[in-house]
Image: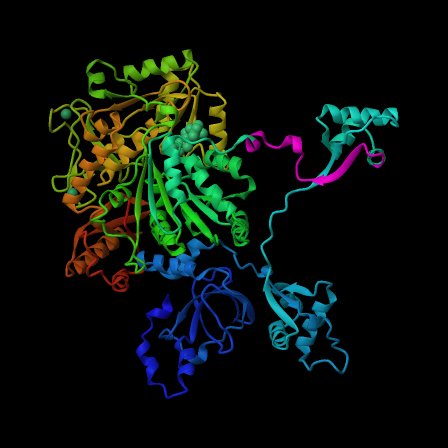
Amino acid sequence: MYIQDINLSSLFVAEPGELYQSKINLNQWIEVLVDCPGSTDLYTYKLPEQLEIKPGDILTVPFGSQQVGAIAIRFLSQLPENLTPEQIREVEDVVSKSFFPSSYWQLLNRIAAYYYTPLIKVIRVALPPGLLGRSQRRLRLTPLGKNQDVSSNTAVFMSPTAQQVIQLLQKTPSGDYSYYYIQQKIKSAYRGTRELIRLGLAENYLEPPKINQPKLQKAVTLLDNNEEDLTPRQKEIIEVLKRQGGELWQTELLQTCSTSTSTLKALEKKGYVVIEEREKLRREQNPSVAGDQAKSLTAAQSQALETIKTLNQFTQVLLHGVTGSGKTEVYLQAIAPLLNQGQSALVLVPEIGLTPQLTDRFRARFGNKVQVYHSALADGERYDTWRQMFTGEPQVVIGTRSAIFAPLPNLGIIILDEEHDSSFKQDAPIPTYHARTVAQWRAELENCPLILGSATPSLESWVSVRNPETPPPSPLPASDEGGQEHIYISLPERINSKPLPPVEIVDMRHELKAGNRSIFSRSLQTALEELKANKQQGILFIHRRGHSTFVSCRSCGYVLECPNCDVSLAYHHVEAGAAELLRCHYCNYGRSHPPHCPECSSPYLKFFGSGTQRVSQELNRQFPHLKLIRFDSDTTRNKGAHRNLITKFANGEADLLVGTQMLTKGLDLPQVTLVGVVAADGLLHLSDYRANERTFQTLTQVAGRAGRGEDPGRVIIQTYTPEHPVIEAVKTHDYQSFCDAELAEREALNYPPFGRLILLRLSSLDPIQVQNTAQIIATNFSEQTGFEILGPAPASILRVANRYRWQILLKFAPDALPNLPDWGEIRALCPASVSLTIDVDPINIM
Ligand code: ADP
Ligand code: ZN
Ligand code: ZN
């Protein structure tokens, strides 16, 4: 907390009796976030002596000529240099104490420090827009205020404005109005409100969040009775009800029987039916909701669950379960008892594409206790979900990256599903946070367990459990709590001991030699033909990633690499008509695109990259009878598109799902037997030190979509480098040996999870200026020690939206973060036309 950062020595010059006074003066100022559209700064206010204010409180402050809501963010012991005490106004009042727990602000401050981001920008990421909407802050009369007869001479003396305000309030039966309304009605109302509060006649409060009321409507329910005294008309109605299972909405019944409400009322009077408001009819309760109960766990699942259940403080658990091993069931059963104890759970998933399926499973288990939160929600929805969290009701929040900021009080567990997924990392804008890192801090601050689940754990998480005696540099700034624990839990088998699908690797060089110029190998072609015949479904995975492609020989598989860096050179698409250029992203080595393969002189030296569109066309040409659904960012742009496409596919409306990365994420479609990977090489040769890890993860995950149902699955991976160790490891489902090899390489080169990286991304409309600035900054760094500087180099797509982009990579030794540069000074080196983003622990270095 900020209080602790303050130099205490100034305190003890006090004369006896003055210590108390000094204490108050220790924090004279507070920075607040004001609720004002477009306000992008924190504002400083003076702390009034009579008020006790803490970060996280909701305040009212004077702002311009108004009085507005504000969140107390942090204390200042000194005024910023450009301000004098005379310019500073006082906080008006506290509306709501501890609206946010103080641990929440600790979290945001930690993010600001670690990611070199101004606190206000962190807050903007964390809080939904309009959180403090003006209508929420309200003023209400106290009992004393209600009984105050302003016109009588025994009334308390008050100013004319105060009289106006109290009279306005007294006109409403509830005696309260929003500040916004009062300010609209009465000029300079805030003086008056202040006075009333001081006199104890009125008080501030924050309107509690509105819980979404379920929609109620009238339902007619049949009661057991002998039908003696019924008219024929009434008998008819009873018959209709019987046929409908004894229950119907009143409106439907009226329509079906062309009758009136009075007829129904008469029936009710006679005791044949009841008419009452209902949220839903009993008979129409969603069968999946009613039907879904905790499954009886496999031995491995029970063991995992038991371990997790015993954790009652911060512990990081790596739940390493192969695809289809039932991790989700473990999450569900770990959460259930927490909800019963009044605690909440936070579940993060990589992408919205997989959320519908997962959310359905959570909803089926926990009903309306489940809330979905992600940035694709409309502002209003986002905001409502937030307010819902403040109720403190035990609930499960499922969301993407930004949901890590969900302000759930009483958090009992945090779960990151598919923790290896790179969409948990924000590349830009700042803060360039990783939800896993933030989750670690949050779980630590809330003292609750953190479960990281994956079939292909990130090397970071793997290392943290594999070498407990020599942990990698913790992303946590030194924590004084100690006792930080890491637990490894394995689910090594699929449910019911279903085998993992066999993986066939097809050498595409042989295909070419055999005269097959199609992008589909003979093996894949046969498998595709068989799909329809066997009434089965398949998934075709295509790697596609912008223009960043590698160059490889189609005859011998040779890949052009950087002589200095051990990464493949990237093909640069600068502009149409310009010379084709190959470049290294790390050291800026560059060369032209050679006409022939340097290895075998073949002219088939090509850059790789084929998108879903092109593959779909090819499929339509070669397999016109196969029905396709394209599943990529083009076809899933609209709201609900993911769900629609997957539902269509699950209903058997297509034979093949053709798509990109999104396919790899947690789809549980039992009918899928075939998984094809069109070209694994596109992944493998990305010019990035993480290329191997990402390839292994992606291929293993996509392979894991096959054979989850009754029919056994099979996987066909096409590649020009079948001998690559990563391909070998995918073929044998051997995570361990992949990790051992990859970690050895990373360690030798000081790459994460051993060393650390910070990437500076510069961009500008001016190509010369950005290049020069990058050079100046790099030169400036070269005087500092403790890290290596790679670059400056142009980003792989040099120009995006007319901005030219350069980058500098800083590589730190594993054991420490010495001599961190002064970012203020670095930023000062950037002219206004050049923008600088500091990406801490970057994942995408391109
Ligand atoms: P993962 O998340 O590890 O890929 P899932 O949780 O999706 O695995 O489980 C795979 C399938 O097995 C799902 O269809 C799930 O409903 C089912 N399943 C999970 N646990 C059990 C169990 N104990 N008994 C029967 N079926 C289970
Ligand atoms: Zn060659
Ligand atoms: Zn290089």
Q: How is the image coloured?
A: rainbow
What residue is drawn where x is 16% and y is 28%? Answer: 558
What residue is drawn where x is 52% and y is 39%? Answer: 366
What residue is drawn where x is 42% and y is 33%? Answer: 634
| Furthest residue toward bottom | 15
Whether residue 664 is visible to the viewer of this picture, yes or no, is no
Q: Give left or right: position of 753 versus 619.
A: left
Magenta span contains residue 286? yes
Count the labels in the image: 0
Locate residue 255: give its quadrant: top right
Q: Quadrant of ligand 2?
A: top left
Locate residue 670: give its quadrant: top left
Q: Give left or right: position of 830 versus 68.
A: left
Q: Give left or right: position of 779 versus 381.
A: left
Residue 704, horizontal then vertical, whole percent:
34, 28
Residue 541, horizontal then vertical, whole percent:
34, 27
Whether residue 744 is visible to the viewer of this picture, yes or no, is yes
Quadrant in the picture for the C terminus: top left
Q: Nearer the viewer, residue 62 or 333?
A: 333
Q: Nearer the viewer, residue 390 or 790?
A: 390
Magenta span contains residue 567? no
Q: Which residues are magenta?
A: 269-290
Residue 433, horizontal then vertical, whole percent:
34, 51
Quadrant in the picture for the N terminus: bottom left
Residue 273, horizontal then vertical, whole percent:
78, 33
